[in-house]
Each structure stands twice: as C-alpha cells, then as structure tokens.
Amino acid sequence: MKFKSIQSKLLLIITIGLVLMATVLATFSITITHGILHTDADALLSAQCEKEATEINDVLGSIEHSVAIMRHYASTELNDDPNVITDESLQAEYLQKMDVMFREITLNTPGAIGYYIRFNHTLTSPTAGFFYSVDQATKTITAQPTTDLTLYDPERDSNKVGWYYQPRRAAKAMWLAPYQSDEDDAEIISFVMPYFAVNGTTFIGVIGIDVPYSFLTDKVASIAVHDNGNATLSQTPPEVHAHSHTRDTAPTAHAYQALKNGLYLVLNAQYSDIQRESRAMLYIIAAIATVITAIFVLITFYATSKITKPLKQLAHSANELADGNYDANFQYDGDDEIGTVAASLKLAAAKLKESMNHFSALAFHDALTGVRSTAAFNQAVADLNLLLENVHRDFAVVVADVNFLKITNDTYGHAVGNQLILHTANVLTETFKNSYVYRIGGDEFAVILDGDDYDNREALMAQLEEKSVGSIIRINDGEELAVSFAFGMASYAKELDTGFDDVLKHADSAMYLHKRALKRSQLQVEQENP
C-alpha cells in the first residue's frame, strides 16, 4: 500500500508516533504509578485542605467585614466626641442610628445569631449599649438584656465578659475562642472590634457579631475526605507525621491549615483511599486519551483548515471580552457549530454589557434620591486621595444634614421623612449643577466641589443658605411642613490637610456649628413668639 499524498503520509507518521508514545507512557506509568501516587498523596490532601480552609475563611472574612463596616459607621457617627456616649439623650439617639444600621448588616451576614455594641462602663452606665439575637431563618431580631459589666471579674469570669475585656486589653479586633452562651448553653464564637475616640486615646466600647460554633463545625463535618477520611477542628497546630499508623490501622496522611479565627482545619485520610481515587482517574484519563487520539488522527487534516481560522478569531474576541471589551467582534458567517458558538458569545457579550451597566447604576446611585451612593462616594474619595499623592488639586467639600428627621419620622412616619431627604437632595443638586451630590448616610449628604463650582463656592454657599430654611412641603391631606437642613463647607489646604478625610472632618465641624446656630435661632423665635 502506497501513501502518495502528503496528508496520508502525515497521517501515518502521526498515527505511528501516537501509538508508540501511548505505549511508552502506559508502560512507564504502570511501572512508577505506585510511587508517584504515594508521593503525591500528601500534596493532594494538602491542596484539598487549603481549598476547604479558603472557603471557610471566606465565610469568616464576611463576618469580619460586617463588623468592620459596623465599627466604621459607629466611629463616623461618634465624630471623635465622647460626649455622644456620656450624654444620655445623645447616647439614645446614637444607639438608635447604630441599631438601624447594624440589623441590616447582620441580617445579610451568613451565620450571624447576634450583634451588639457595648460602651465603656467607666464613661456611662455598666449596661449601656444593646444586644440583639437574630433568627436567620425567620429574619427576626429580638432585644436581649445587656450584661452588667461591674458584676463580673475580668479574669475569673472571662467566659461571661471576655468578649468585652479581651479586645479592650488587646486594643485590636479579634476572634474569641469558642465559649458557652448564657442563653442556651450553646457554644458560640464571636468576632469583636474595639473602637476609640480623641485620636485613639479614649476607649469607647466594643462592637461584635456572635456565630454559633455549630455553624463552623457543620461546615467542617460536611467536608468529604475520600472514602474513610474525616475533617476536624483543632485549637492548636496538630503534630502531623507523614505515613503515621499503628499495627492495626492503615498508613494515614494528614494536612492542616490555619483559619482566620485561630482554629485549625485538619484533614485525615488513608493513603490507600487517596491512591485508589487517583489510580482510577489515571485509568480513565488513559482510556479517554486513547479514544481522543484515534479520533484526532482521523479528523486532524480535514478539520484544521475548516476550524483554525474562525477559532482563532473567536479566541481573540473572547480575550477582548475577558479584558472588558463588551463590543468584541464575534461575527462568523458559517451556519455550523462554530457559528452557533459565535452567535451565543455575541449574545452573551451583549447581555453581560447590559448587566454590568445595570449593576453599575445600582451600585453607584441612591435608590431614593437618585444622587450618587455611598459606594460612589468611597470610590471618588479613593481616586481623589490617589491623585493628591502626586499632584495638587483644589477642591472643597460640602456636608449637609437634614434637620428634625427623627422627630418627623416619629410624628408623621418614614414616608414623610423620606420627603425631607428627597427635598434636601433636590436643593443640593439644583445648587451645585457641576458637581456630584452623594448620599453618604440616612440623612447626610456630601458634595465634592471642583472646577466652576469650586471657583464660585462662596456664591453657591450663599444660595444654599437661602434655600436651607423656610421651604415648605405638603404632606398627608395638604398639611404644610417646614423643611430645613444644616450644612458646612471646608476647602482643601495642602499645608494643613493630609488628605480628603481632614477636609471632610472640617466640613462636618462647620455643619454642626451651623446646626447649633439654626437651633439657637429657632429657640429665640419660639421665645419671642410663644
């Protein structure tokens, strides 16, 4: 039989080469399989342990992130003023704000069964703060009595008040070792953060989230470790000895990884189990490779000319899509499978572009007012701070806060309160036409002035002064309600300010001075017109 064509000659050469290669590889694999599998068993178990620990740490990390957000909000609202804690009326208002924010965060935190904020008992009452239990199944929150810190010894009763004294002494966020709950004697773990005022010198209190220890142990128990292996938790690094076994047990492999909360995830499995799975996989791979090799030899020369060019184009377009180019070209005129794939990728790119635009709009705009959201504000601040590291940039910050929002909510309901917030957002947007307005809190707004708005800031602030009081909105059945808001502005001074946060603090201070002035003015009017 003669092979005249180049295609047949190449096919013969490729076939002979693939058969020889498969034979050599099979013989070599059979010879050294046992040694390779035994050597790789520890690596396979370690890789699984690392993967499982990463998944658990992601869950623990989400809890840490939730507490960090809560502490940031608490510190921001405190505004470095311990009087907010020591004054009973200010403390009550402060706690109400914390409760609204904390419960929303906790309900979206996997595994959380409780959250709390407790104040330094040397500054206020030994029971000051709050503690709520959470039922994630029904999304219900129940107030619980707060512990009287003066009734327990920090050392002898650490099981009852360690959540307060341990992070206080350490002056840093920390996971507590599993301990018994006072409510139902169930074991729990807690992540707690202390926070401070007066430039970090005055201890204000602690903020934390409780998670049932079973939430962690159930995740560990669900880990499948080959046929007869198991996963456990340890409070100390276990001593791992490769090939450890006794006369009555098979050789066993061990692996462990540290978790965020100070515990260790430990995996144990018999070498025979690990090798059995790997050996079966090796045989399957060899069989699949043999079949694919035979098919590949038959279609190589025919398919190459038909597939290579359009596939390269699709691969190039897919890489562009992966790099964020949602307008990548997936045009292909054929009506075969490649055409179907090209059409699907084109449709997927369009859907992805639409979804990304939608999500971006949701993330960076406030649903109630239509102005930019806290996420957009944080991004703008990060970009501006990065810019200030390299070049000088003139800008100013305006902070505004709705007056009497709590009284309005309590008297007329939150729907009317939302009208006050929306009115304030509209006034700010109409005044600062060339700058973005951000809603950075329930009733707090910020505007970053640059360009024309920065140059005309004094005139714009005068306009804002006229609009900040005296406005009337109609509510319910035509009842009129006065609307006012306090505001303050600060300009960036390169010689005095280290970054955006300093300017924001100055603007906040100016706003609070304005708010106090408005209250004095209102009181004077009430006294003159009883």
Image: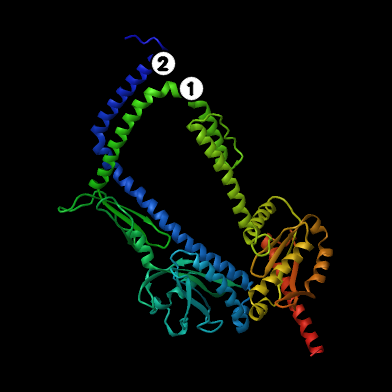
Pick the residue in front: 64 or 349. Answer: 349
Q: What element carries label 2?
A: helix
Residue 93 location (% of width, % of height): 61, 79
Residue at screen point 57% across, 77% down: 95
Q: Name the residue under label 1.
A: 305
Q: Residue 364 carries which label?
A: none
The C terminus lies in quadrant? bottom right
Q: How is the image coloured?
A: rainbow
Q: What element carries label 1?
A: helix
Q: Mark 2 points at which residue?
A: 7
Residue 478 to residue 524: above or below: above
The image quadrant of residue 289 is top left
Pick the residue in front: 81 or 455. Answer: 455
Q: Which amino acid does label 1 sit on?
A: Ser
Across the whole image, how many numbered discs are drawn on residues?
A: 2
Q: In this view, does 278 lie to the left or right of 421?
A: left
Residue 439 visible here = yes
Pick the residue in front: 148 or 229. Answer: 229
Check contact, mark 2 vs mark 1: CB within 8 A. no
Q: In this view, does 324 lie to the left or right of 468?
A: left
Give me the C-alpha separation between circle 2 and circle 1.
12 Å
In primary-sequence order, the first of circles 2 and 1 is 2
Pick the residue in front: 123 or 19. Answer: 19
Q: What residue type is labelled 2?
A: Gln
Q: Residues within 10 Å of mark 2 (few under 14, many from 20)?
A: few
Residue 191 to residue 494: above or below: below
Residue at screen point 78% across, 72% down: 468
